[in-house]
Image (cartoon, coloured by chain):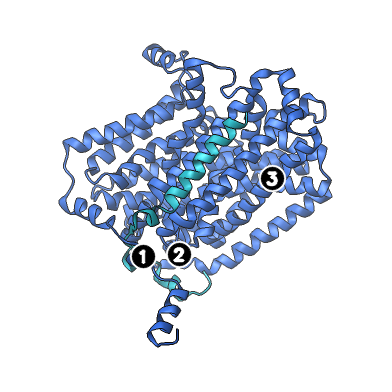
Amino acid sequence: MWATLIIPTLLAIVVMFVYGFWDKITGKEYFVDDEILGYDEELIKEDGV
Amino acid sequence: MNGVLVGFVVYLIVLAYIGFWAKRFTKTEDQYFVGGRKVKVLAAALSDKASDFSGWLMLGYPGQAFSTGLGAFWAAIGCLFGTLADYVLIGPRLRIYAGRFRAITVPDYLEARLKDDTKLIRILGAIIILIFMTAYVSAQFKAGGKALSQAFGLDVSTAIILTAIIVTAYVLTGGFFAVVWTDVIQALFMVATLIVVPIVAVSAIGGIDKAVEVMASVDPKHLSPFGGATGLAALIFAIGYASWIVGYFGQPHIVTRYMSVEDPRKLRRPGIFISGFWTIAVLWGAFFAGFLGFALAKAGIVQVSDAERIIPAMAMALMPSWLAGFIIAGILAAIMSTADSQLLVASSAISRDIIHKVMGMELGKRQMVNIGRIVVIALAIVAIFYAMSESKLVYGMVATAWGGLAVGFGPILLLSLWWKRITKEGGIVGMAYGLISEVILEAFIYGWEFNPKAPGIFGAIGATLSGVPVFFVNFFVTMAIIILVSLITKPPKDVMELHERIFRKVPIEVARSRSQAENVAEFAKANGLI
């Protein structure tokens, strides 16, 4: 019973860590600038969001 | 009863406060429908999961674990890997394109990505959202109505209207920010509920070994990973449950969360960890609630007539009234956190996609938001009507909703984010096929899964694929259609160039903005302070 529950869960955790640190592993990440962030202009003036 | 009422009133006060607080962030369509693309990753990730998991998590899934036993864990595997697949394949890339195109809705993004000047993709997208999302909202209102009615002894119709009023009120006032932050509270409620219930259940039965012993003596199939099936039947059993994975790619109320997050890179870290670990906690909790609930019922400790009511039954039988109230609030939180997100997405399909973009109505920013609010009210009224209706057509649309959205949006979203060669013709044909085929196959011919009872040739196909969910097969058929049509047509050169350019990767020192600590360290170093 425990194998059915634990093996897929551990596999999922491995996927999380590999993807979560893929930028560290490869040393590369998507390029992002203000144009891509595209924040709502009025919202930028607000604080605490 | 008093404990339940007090817990519920406190919960309503929190929702009202968030709705009031978020009102200041509803000045533009950008803010009202997608949080100005500046939502904190913690909130976006928790909102993603709270919107995803509806009353199914608290009622339907524990019911499956109660009835099927260990085999029901395959559904958890499907949901968990569907969640991860969304982060790996959809989230960051969709956020990058959404920011670049200033897209607010999924049809907004698709129209810009495929450079569709015919508006057909937007219209098809809006129709898919309207048909399936409105049905989905009505299902949530109905589930919320039933839960409220049982908790407070109200008439079901009155309880449905009450659920709709509560949800509509904070969606109306606070828009996306209210939906996201109420989802955060609801996500915490849900996870707490699903940690408490199995702990109480284990303690009541006398340990997991004792529960397993009871199950083995009553029904050994409950301990089989494939519900007692072997060979091909076991494979179909597993596919039937795990097929949920592909459904995740096309749910607009989920993927809109990725479009709203403050930075696409944060979906990689910490986004996937927040969603992933939350999902593991709630799915293990919901599974064990049903799994142990079966043993409790067979041991005569808990009485339950309907498997899907196992969590409320355990709450009433094993917990003090204040804790039972907390559990009931957890069930309502699961239902409302899905209903609010779906209501907002459905209203964006009319106000943003149809009224603003297709009909070309250009008013002031505030007026466009107010049109959005009017549409929210109109859709809530339609959803209430559907929720109270006993119509077979409405029931068919509700049952088709997950599959319809999965097939309507999943293949086109996945391909448009990962394949530069996709064309608008491929998108139009694929989405039209997805919409029409899902309605016909699921609502009129097969229902949720293939079966041999369907008429004519469909019966023969149904016999071959018996037990496999229709949307799972139709997802890949739709994907093949989009690829085929795209290959015989040609995308504009600038669209392909943008696709290559926008997803270029750079060294992480360039990609990641430096933290405040790093800036201070560099300043100190430059000035000889360290």
Q: Position of residue B369 (x, y in %)?
A: 46, 62
Amino acid type at mark 3: Ile
Q: Are marks 1 and 2 in contact (CB under 8 Å)?
A: no
Residue, disc 1: A38
Tell me which amino acid carries mark 1: Gly
Q: Nearer the viewer, mark 3 or mark 1?
A: 3
Instruction: Tell me residue B125's x, y (percent).
Output: 36, 44
**Residue type of the residue flagged with mark 2:** Lys
Give the quadrant of residue B291: top right
Image quarter hosting the C terminus of chain B = bottom left
Q: Which chain is cyan?
A: A
Of badges 3 and 2, nearer the viewer stands 3
Helix, strand or loop at label 2? It is loop
Q: Which residue is mark 2?
A: B38
Residue B45 in view of the camera:
yes
**What residue is at 34 percent from the left and 68 percent from the top?**
A34
Q: Quadrant of residue B383?
A: top right
Provide the residue designation for mark 3: B195
Q: Crowding near pointer 3: few (<14 within 10 Å), some, many (20+)? A: some
